[in-house]
Image: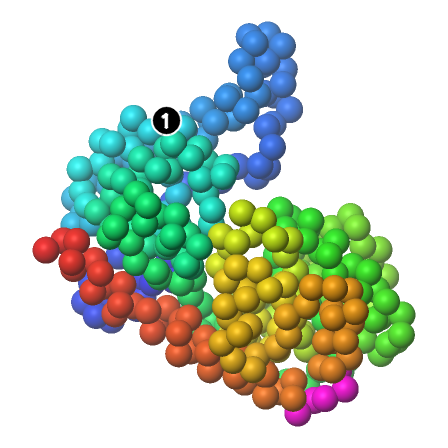
Amino acid sequence: MQYKDPFATTGDFLETKFFTPLKEVNPAPWSYKLKKLTGINEWRSTDWIKTIGRTSLLFAQSGYDLIWQNRLLQLHHFFWETKLRKPVVFDFDDAIWLNEGEKQVIRKIEQSAMIFAGNNYLADYALKYNKNTVIVPTTIDTTKLFPLNKEAPHFTIGWIGTKSNFQYLEIVKPAVLQFLSRNKDSRFIIVSSEKPEQFLFDNKQVIFKTWDADKENEMINEFSVGLMPLTDSDWTRGKCSYKMLQYMACGKPVIVSPVGMNEQLINSGNIGFAATREDEWINALIELKNNDADAKDKGENGRKLVETNYSCATMTLHILEQFKKVIN
């Protein structure tokens, strides 16, 4: 969706269509009641609801030169996916074969005209089934996320993310709480749609803020440093460091788990620290708190890196060039 305006500046028309996802990933309570009455598995009934919700989108795709598709439209009901008659560029920035059905994902990759993979790990997977695979990294709209250059009254550790990623906060919880106990003038802000249960929010040192798209830039700019902890798994190696890129776009230094794309980014410039052990997280926080000049340099370097390699403005022409190869 962030490419709609950049495409328009080149005279190309991009119409965005999307389905509204279910509020909860897990099956709804009614699906368990249905199971008792009919024996239909709660996950299968949830899958059918998702499929029905996406059907109109599937049949709305005629009349275009090319379909730029992210995720499977019909989940495990791949028969309908084959009814798309326009060239499809299938774009994925997660290891979606792990939770959307590997057989269906492989078939989609095989039958697509081109694949956009968000990082090397995903590209290596896609290349096994489609040689016409191009790495197109996750990008940031740098006109919406940018440094506000305001002096923060407190050293502020920040994390932004969805409920599904709360599990990774467990990695940094001991280090953050220990750091806060030793630095009473510091604070930790979590931005999400709801509060993670593993933290006690006192609204002084540990603060929760409800995510708001219109205030996202303002919220991230409150951070002195952005955290992106991850476990090391097949799923996390497929992640494309969007959270990390958000911090960098706002000119914030980062501390991250060196997993997948995170490792590639942290090694590409003096933008922050990689941390694995608890003491490494703490030492990185101490270094950034006590060295304003270094923290500022790292933040500025991160912003430059995003502008050069990970902004939608920079990537627009590259994407359009790939599309023309498919259309022509």
Q: Is residue 255 magenta?
A: no
The residue to which callout 1 is attached is 77
**Residue displayed at 59% across by 7% down:** 37
x and y percentages locating residue 27 in the rendered image: 59, 28
As helix, strand or loop, the secondary structure at mark 1 comes to: loop
**Residue displayed at 31% across by 35% down:** 107
x and y percentages locating residue 9 in the rendered image: 24, 71
Q: How would you rate the neighbour count of disc 1 (Cα within 10 Å): few for under 14, some for 14-19, many for 20 or more?
A: some
Q: Nearer the viewer, residue 109 or 72?
A: 109
Q: Which range of residues does the magenta coloring cover?
A: 289-293
**Residue displayed at 30% across by 43% down:** 129
Residue 33: which quarter of the image?
A: top right
Residue 123: which quarter of the image?
A: bottom left
Residue 173: which quarter of the image?
A: bottom right
Q: Is residue 148 left or right of residue 315?
A: right
Q: Nearer the viewer, residue 281 or 90?
A: 281
**Residue displayed at 47% across by 46% down:** 95
Q: Is residue 42 left or right of residue 102?
A: right
